[in-house]
Image: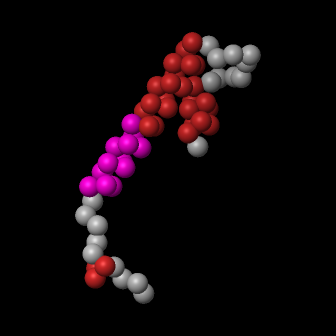
């Protein structure tokens, strides 16, 4: 899950509030994951879709 991955990576221990370093790390982590997701979605959108005659319904 996006939030737990970035939180586990960036926060050493939970406290009253996030430090500036942890906040920046979480921001960068989330942006990288969003960019990666967008990249994959764009690549998948460019894949040729099979025609119904090519789909095996067995």
Q: Position of residue 17 (x, y in %)?
A: 69, 16
| Image: 10 above or below 56 | above
Using the rendered view, name the quadrant where residue 32 is placed.
top left
Is residue 33 one of those drawn in magenta?
no
Image quarter of the C terminus? bottom left
Residue 16 in the figure: left or right of residue 30: right
Q: Is most of the magenta stretch helix, strand or loop?
A: helix
| Image: 17 above or below 10 | above
Image quarter of the N terminus? top right
Q: Residue furthest right?
A: 16
Q: Position of residue 16 (x, y in %)?
A: 74, 16
Q: Residue furthest top?
A: 20
Q: Nearer the viewer, residue 10 or 31?
A: 31
Q: Position of residue 11 (x, y in %)?
A: 62, 24
Using the rendered view, name the quadrant where residue 10 is placed.
top right
Looking at the rendered structure, the number of numbered marks drawn on it comes to 0
| Image: 43 above or below 23 | below
Residue range corresponding to the magenta coloring: 35-46
What residue is shown at x 49% (from left), y 30% (from top)? 29
Q: Nearer the viewer, residue 20 or 52?
A: 52
Q: Residue furthest bottom?
A: 58
| Image: 3 above or below 51 | above
What residue is shown at x 59% (from left), y 36% (from top)? 3
Using the rendered view, name the quadrant where residue 39 is placed.
top left
Residue 50 in the figure: left or right of residue 34: left
Residue 32 in the figure: left or right of residue 22: left
What residue is shown at x 49% (from left), y 32% (from top)? 30
What residue is shown at x 38% (from left), y 42% (from top)? 38
Display colour scheme? secondary structure
């Amino acid at each position: 899950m996006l939030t737990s991955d970035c939180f586990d990576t960036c926060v050493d221990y939970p406290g009253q509030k996030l430090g500036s370093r942890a906040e920046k790390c979480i921001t960068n982590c989330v942006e990288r994951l969003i960019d990666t997701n967008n990249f994959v979605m764009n690549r998948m959108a460019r894949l040729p879709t099979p025609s119904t005659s090519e789909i095996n319904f067995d």
